[in-house]
Amino acid sequence: MGAQPSQCCNGCGDRNMETAEEVEAHPWTEEDPSKSTGQLPPPGSKVAFNRPKHGRSLLDLLQGKWHRKEDGQPVGDISGTYIVWNPRWQFQEVISPISEDVSGAVVIDLEKQLHFGRPYFGPETLISWGDGDLWVKKSAV
């Protein structure tokens, strides 16, 4: 998403991008590991739980500023159930709805096209998009 200004999903096919496994991240999952093994993983292990404590949703965890992993270019800010695009992309819509589907994927409705991404939580919070784009959440300083 956003490989070229004012166009989405172009030019992503031959990118040699870092995969989630290479950064030891784990996908958002609907399964709590304690239910399958009967015990929680050891402290410090890199496991993504279904729902964090205090009722935080997937979108709650994704709130904040996002950049492309490949080149550090700003993508936009996820705020509530919307993404506010960085002006550099020159999309017709400055704000797009973002949601979670039943599989735990992130869905953005951009210019009447749905784009699906898989969030990963590890040393970095990432979203891997269906077109090959990889976004990283910038930490609050």
Image (tube, rainbow, N blue to C red):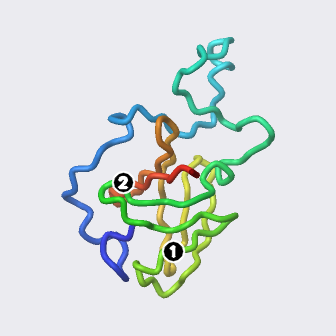
Query: Left or right: where does residue 117 sit relative to residue 96?
Result: left
Residue 42 quadrant:
top right
Query: Left or right: where does residue 24 sit relative to residue 54?
Result: left
Query: Left or right: where does residue 17 sit relative to residue 75?
Result: left
Which quadrant does the N terminus fall into? Answer: bottom left
Residue 80 quadrant:
bottom right
Q: Whole-Å distance between the Cαs marked 2 and 1?
A: 16 Å
Q: What is the crowding at mark 1: few (fewer than 14 residues within 10 Å), some, or many (at least 20)? A: many
Residue 34: percent from left, percent from top: 67, 19
Q: Residue at x 51, y 79 (%)?
A: 112
Residue that mark 1 sits on: 85
Q: Residue furthest right?
A: 54
Mark 2 or mark 1: name the one nearer the start of the chain. 2
Q: Nearer the viewer, residue 133 or 109?
A: 133
Residue 101: percent from left, percent from top: 61, 55
Residue 50, compared with residue 135, is above or below; it is above
Q: Amino acid at mark 1?
A: Trp
Residue 3: percent from left, percent from top: 31, 69
- For residue 69, the mark is 2
